Amino acid sequence: MHELSLCQNLMDQVNELARKHGARSVSSVKVQIGQLAGVEPLLLESAFTIARAGTIAEQAEMITEVVAPIVVCNDCGKESEVTPSNLLCLACGGNDTRLIRGDELILARVELVVDEDPQTH
């Protein structure tokens, strides 16, 4: 299950952000998963439960957002949101397209819990 490996990499990034900002815990982690990324959202969420154990994000919720593929047509220059099984340009019907979104896995947001600085009050 490569989702566990992906989650371990995500947790490395989350732990670094938490350390950098002096967080005492992480409340949520949001990821964007392209439909063509080869990542199954439910498996990623399940793997996250394992990867977060014993970390600063042990109680964190994972929020997944699935991102549809977007192509740009090399013939007409238009961008189209397409389905994973049909990467044709929706504007002109051309098949000379380039994928510009939809194959990524992005750590989009991490919500940290930090103690308020008593000196600022």
Image (cartoon, helix red, strand yellow):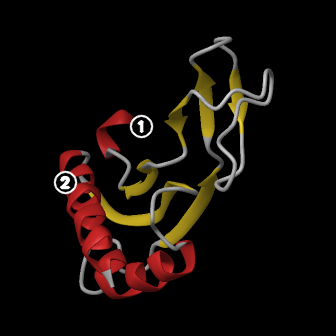
Mark 2, other Cα within 10 Å: few <14 / some 14–19 / many ≥20: few
In the image, what residue occupies the spot 30% across and 62% down?
10
Residue 39's place in the image compared with 117, above or below, is below
Residue 1, placed above or below residue 92: below
- Whether residue 9 sits left or right of residue 59 in the image: it is left
Location of residue 15 (image quadrant): bottom left
Q: Position of residue 117 (x, y in %)?
A: 32, 44
Asked which secondary structure carries label 1, the reply is loop
At 19% across and 46% down in the image, what residue appears?
20
The one nearer the camera, 117 or 2, is 2
Relative image position of residue 57 (x, y in whole percent):
35, 72
Q: Quadrant of residue 91?
A: top right
Q: Residue at x 24, y 85 (%)?
A: 54
Residue wearing tag 2? 16
Count of picture labels: 2
Earlier sequence position, callout 2 versus callout 1: 2
Q: Quadrant of the N terminus?
A: bottom left
Amino acid under label 2? Answer: Glu
**114 or 87: nearer the viewer:** 87
Q: Is residue 27 left or right of residue 12?
A: right
Identify the residue position indicated by label 1 in the image.
Answer: 121
Front residue of 73 and 110? 73
Q: Position of residue 6 (x, y in %)?
A: 30, 68
Quarter of the figure with residue 120: top left
Q: Is residue 56 visible?
A: no
Crowd rating for badge 1 (residues with CA inside 10 Å; few <14, some 14–19, many 20+): few
